[in-house]
Image (spheres, helix red, strand yellow):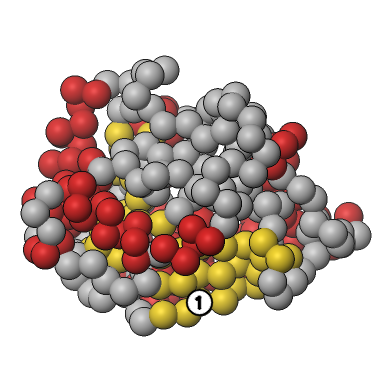
């Protein structure tokens, strides 16, 4: 893996704390079954020409249902995301981040190219409009930025996680800048979104985190078996790309728009240095 790729120090052993309350195993299994049913329904739609005619409001509602089916309450605040070409960016904690962003506004996701080669899932992702990046080829980055800009100019929303890796939710990473070049080239605004997971009303929870050597199955089960999780989705003010001369300035403005999340510790709370492999959908 290339040395320039971002990596978070978060690991399941040092960062992820189980929820204080757990539901009974049969209830957790029912939650997983509900999530599976919703995903299969989406697959059935993706495989037909009907997918191009599904209203955005229906996709957003379905995305909320996926999170709720997993046993997580959803709380969305802020103004609705605007129509037209839009770059959605958010901090990255969990696999739940993807449907949560779609609940704000359905968008084409930016994903690592390895997903394209996954059995079944890769073909479905490509058919569903996912954009891919070759993380091991820095020379391919300009082509990826150009593809993103093309989609944005066509009026699509594109969702990315500029931290480039998942973090535990109590620590965070800096925004990588390349994805913001696409917004500048296309002349579209950036919509920052702040994601938090709480156990109860106030306490930040790391239970939904998908970090380091964690497996997707382990993370999904941890969420489904937790009690009282809430996902907070704060839609921050739009950042107009035209007001910023370069991608550095635009990236900094997008980070500043969600500055409240930096009230969490600026460094990793456990102080460990071992780098973990990235689980991020976006590595720009």
Residue nearest the observer in this picture, 228 or 196: 196
Place of residue 127 in the rendered image (x, y in percent of width and height, measured from the top left): 34, 46
Residue hosting label 1: 76
- Position of 160 relative to 113 (above/below): below
| Crowd band around label 1 with a 10 angstrom C-alpha radius: few (<14), some (14–19), many (20+) | some
> Foreground residue, 219 or 27?
219
Horizontal side of residue 4 vs 194, given as left or right: left
What residue is rendered at 50% in x and 77% in y? 76
Vertical position of residue 182 compared to residue 71: above or below: above
Q: Is residue 211 left or right of residue 260?
A: right
Q: Is 211 drawn above or below residue 235 in the view shown?
A: above
Q: Quadrant of residue 138?
A: top left
Residue 191 falls in image quadrant: bottom left
Report x, y in % for residue 229. 71, 66
Of the pair 137 and 194, the residue shown nearer to us: 194
Can you see residue 28?
no
Residue at 37% x, 72% y is: 236
Residue 152: percent from the left, percent from the top?
Answer: 17, 57
Res 245 seen here? yes
For the image, the number of numbered tags is: 1
Image quadrant for the N terminus?
Answer: top left
* Drawn side of residue 66 relative to residue 203, left or right: left
Label 1 SS:
strand
Is 116 placed above or below 41 here? Answer: above
Q: Residue at x 79, y 50 (%)?
A: 18
**From the image, which quarter does the C terminus lie in?**
top left
Q: Is residue 32 left or right of residue 170?
A: right
Q: Position of residue 255 (x, y in %)?
A: 35, 57
């Amino acid at each position: 893996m290339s040395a320039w790729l971002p990596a978070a120090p978060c690991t399941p052993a040092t960062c992820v704390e189980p929820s204080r309350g757990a539901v009974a195993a049969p209830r957790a299994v029912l939650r997983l079954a509900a999530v599976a049913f919703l995903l299969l329904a989406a697959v059935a739609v993706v495989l037909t020409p009907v997918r191009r005619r599904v209203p955005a409001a229906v996709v957003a509602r379905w995305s909320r249902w996926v999170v709720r089916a997993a046993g997580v309450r959803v709380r969305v605040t802020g103004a609705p995301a605007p129509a037209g070409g839009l770059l959605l960016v958010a901090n990255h904690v969990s696999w739940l981040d993807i449907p949560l962003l779609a609940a704000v506004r359905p968008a084409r996701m930016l994903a690592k190219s390895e997903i394209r080669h996954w059995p079944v899932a890769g073909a479905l992702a490509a058919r569903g409009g996912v954009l891919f990046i070759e993380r091991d080829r820095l020379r391919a980055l300009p082509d990826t930025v150009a593809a993103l800009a093309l989609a944005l100019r066509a009026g699509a929303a594109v969702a990315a996680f500029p931290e480039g890796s998942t973090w535990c939710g109590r620590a965070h990473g800096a925004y990588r800048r390349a994805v913001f070049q696409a917004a500048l080239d296309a002349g579209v605004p950036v919509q920052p979104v702040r994601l938090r997971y709480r156990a109860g009303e106030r306490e930040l929870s790391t239970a939904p985190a998908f970090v380091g050597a964690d497996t997707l199955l382990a993370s999904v089960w941890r969420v489904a078996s937790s009690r009282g999780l809430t996902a907070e989705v704060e839609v921050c003010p739009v950042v107009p790309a035209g007001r910023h001369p370069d991608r550095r300035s635009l990236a900094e403005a997008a980070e500043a728009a969600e500055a409240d999340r930096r009230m969490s510790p600026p460094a990793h709370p456990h102080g460990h240095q071992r780098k973990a492999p990235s689980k991020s959908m976006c590595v720009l």
